[in-house]
Amino acid sequence: MKQDLPWLEDVVRAKPKQRVPVVLTREETAALLRELDGTPQLVAVLLYGSGLRLFEAMQLRVKDIDFSANQIVVRCGKGGKDRRTMLPARAIPALREQIEFVRRQHEQDVARGAGYVALPDAMSVRTRAPRA
């Protein structure tokens, strides 16, 4: 068409719509958490109270939890970065129980000849903790 459209210069693009996130009220959150129990409740409390993403909660290891500082270390979170977040006080008793339960379960597995994982040769001969 090759026509000059000078009026087009004054046209402003529409701004993209911003969605307002749907957030549960405190009462709704409390009611939801009351409906859960056991490990699912512990995970939900961690997600809500510490701001963990679901995948981050599933990847947590005992060494990532600092009870003395009430912090959780998130390793390789979004963007591949490490970060620290708060450990919710409400999660501490259930988290300690879960760690103790898994420790006892591991000891029972080892006693019956299981509970080990295959490690690369160099890792399997290590007998002392690495230096800090």
Image (cartoon, rainbow, N blue to C red):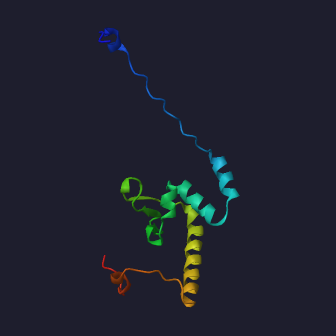
Question: Which residue appears at 53% of the width and 87% of the height?
Answer: 110
Q: Quadrant of the C terminus?
A: bottom left
21 up-or-down from 129: above or below: above
- In the image, taking residue 125 as reference, residue 91 lies left or right, namely right
Q: Residue at x 54, y 56 (%)?
A: 47
Give coordinates of residue 6: x percent, y percent: 31, 9
Give the number of marks: 0
Q: Residue 115 or 37: which is nearer the viewer? A: 115
Q: In this picture, is 14 found above or below 49? A: above
- Tell me residue 63's x, y (percent): 44, 71
* 91 lies left or right of 35: left
When the figure is inspected, residue 125 is found, relative to residue 60, above or below; the finding is below
> The N terminus appears in which quarter of the rendering?
top left
Residue 126: x %, y % from top left = 35, 85
Give the quadrant of residue 89.
Answer: bottom right
Residue 122: image location, x then y, percent: 33, 82
Q: Quadrant of residue 38?
A: bottom right
Q: Residue at x 46, y 68 (%)?
A: 65
Q: Nearer the viewer, residue 61 or 33?
A: 61
The answer to whether 81 appears left or right of 49 in the picture is: left
Q: Which is more toward the observer, 49 or 52?
A: 52
Residue 1 drawn above or below residue 96: above
Q: Residue furthest front?
A: 1
* Residue at 55% from the left image edge and 80% from the top image edge: 103
